[in-house]
Amino acid sequence: MTGVSMRERVKRPPSEALLDSYISPALARAFAFNFENEIWVHLAHAQMLVRQGIIGAGDADAIMAALLRLHGMGPEVLGADGSLEDLYSYTERWLIGELGPEVGGRLHTGRSRNDLDVTKWRMTLRTAMLATLERLLDMRDAVLEGASRYADMVMPGYTHSQHAQPVTFGYYLLGFADVLARDFSRGFAALSRTNCSPLGAAALTTTSFPLDREWTAAALGFEGLVEVAYDAVSSRDDAHETAAAMAILMTGLSRLATDLQAWSTMEYGMVELGDQHSAVSSIMPQKKNPAALEHIKAEAAQITGYLVAALASSKNTAYGDVSDGVTGTADPSLDAVLRTGRVLRLFAEVLGALTLAPDRMRHLAAIGFGTATELADVIVSATGLSFRMAHNIVANVVTEAIEQGRTADTITAGELDAASTLLFGRTLGLDPAVVTAALDPAGNVRRRRVTGGPAPDTLAAMVAARVASLAGDRDALQRVGSFVRDARARVFAAARPVA
């Protein structure tokens, strides 16, 4: 049995330097993330070989019984001693040690490590994506709940980090809920393209054995095939797309974290993080540092780096099975998904623990001249002046108020008349009550009823539509997860009676 090996072409084991830099880290990752899928793939492949009459049922039964024993013992029993280069090599060595080369050596019929490895990594990435997309849905749920709860909580809206127009905190969150919905769409599309089976491609041209690739694809929970064998073992755009989806998602989360961090400062005073998401200073007793938000922003940078690493691993590599262009994408894409999932869990928790300051928000919205646009609109509606003329009048009054150290809520109808006379030689004659109403931030919000605006009833309808969309997305994700779980259960159940 010792003469049966995959290293016959080379006469010396891997060097210490190669082990240290490449093989040992890769083995550790494979043992941690691929062992379960390794066994699943082997069981499905053995069952297909019998169905197709390629190997005998007795040999397949012995192989599957041994694989189930190995699954029960765990990867540690394989004894990674550095003499072999990957998880499959250790698995095959163990299997042949248990069954002998005549039986154990039949499992690899019609297969290559090329298609086997990329199949396992797609399955591992699929598992991670299912979990992370579930957390993304939970984050969307939390954001939509906040959008509904805070639909009337008036605050300043900002453009270019300056007061723009009054909004509500619920409206702000609703906008971000749509960002997350698009993130899910991208992630789910990436999952769908990841969830295609390369198995049966062998080295790059399939095999002369009559494999049933469609059967093994379904048995492994895949939605279809990467049909062209050359493509199946050469391309990892599934990993690239997945990493890109995670980097885009995290970029959006970093922007939300940036706003919340700014709004938690004394200068804004609009939100406060929960103590459980904060840190303290070792020297300044008054400090409550936004540790969770700073961590989220740092993670966004790391995951952008994973995208770059995944793309760079494949850039300028030959189109074929190559370790850098194909296998090299596995770690960064998987890490991007795993770390994004952890951040989503944390961020949903952060949102649930926020303390808001509605009086402070309302005060800032009232004094910050964000109602100036509505005041110009009222002048147009009441007097027939063009919007540009009204804009000039209001800008003149706002400039004077700022120079005098006054706030927006002190503007009067008389000041508007004076500015209009100066600029256009006519008064406006606005009722002071009309001016006061135009300068009310909550009134500004209520009047913005155009599709997509922040008026509470408009917002409520949008939230309801998005809650329904979220439920549909959750159902779609659960269908994929159920299909995968059921496929695994069938394969293991089919193997157990022979164990």
Image: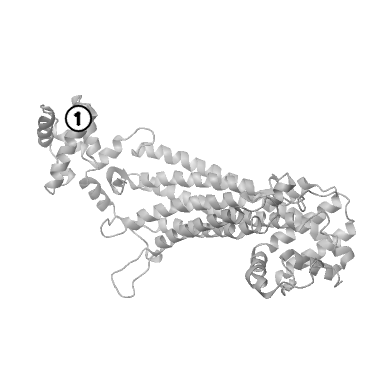
Report the quarter where the N terminus lies: bottom right
What residue is shown at x 40% (from left), y 49% (from top)? Answer: 146
Q: Position of residue 390 (x, y in %)?
A: 20, 31
Q: Is residue 55 visible?
A: yes
Identify the residue under disc 1: 389
Does 190 sit left or right of 116 as displayed? left
Q: Is residue 499 visible?
A: no
Q: Position of residue 283 (x, y in %)?
A: 31, 75
Which one is nearer the viewer's eye here, 174 or 97? 97
The residue lying furthest to the top in this view is 384
Residue 121 vs 386, above or below: the answer is: below
Q: Residues within 10 Å of mark 1 (few under 14, many from 20)?
A: some
Report the quarter where the C terminus lies: bottom right
What residue is shown at x 75% (from left), y 53% (from top)? Answer: 490
Residue 445 vs 430, above or below: the answer is: below
The tally of labels here is 1
Colouring of the image: one colour
Does 69 sit left or right of 53 as displayed? left
Q: Secondary structure at mark 1?
A: helix
Quadrant housing residue 267: bottom left
Q: Amino acid at mark 1?
A: Met
Which one is nearer the viewer's eye here, 306 or 360? 306
Q: Position of residue 181 (x, y in %)?
A: 49, 44
Does 421 sit left or right of 21 as displayed? left
Q: Position of residue 320 (x, y in %)?
A: 70, 52
Does 224 sit left or right of 264 as displayed? right
Which one is nearer the viewer's eye here, 478 or 385? 385
What residue is shown at x 65% (from left), y 58% (from top)? Answer: 327
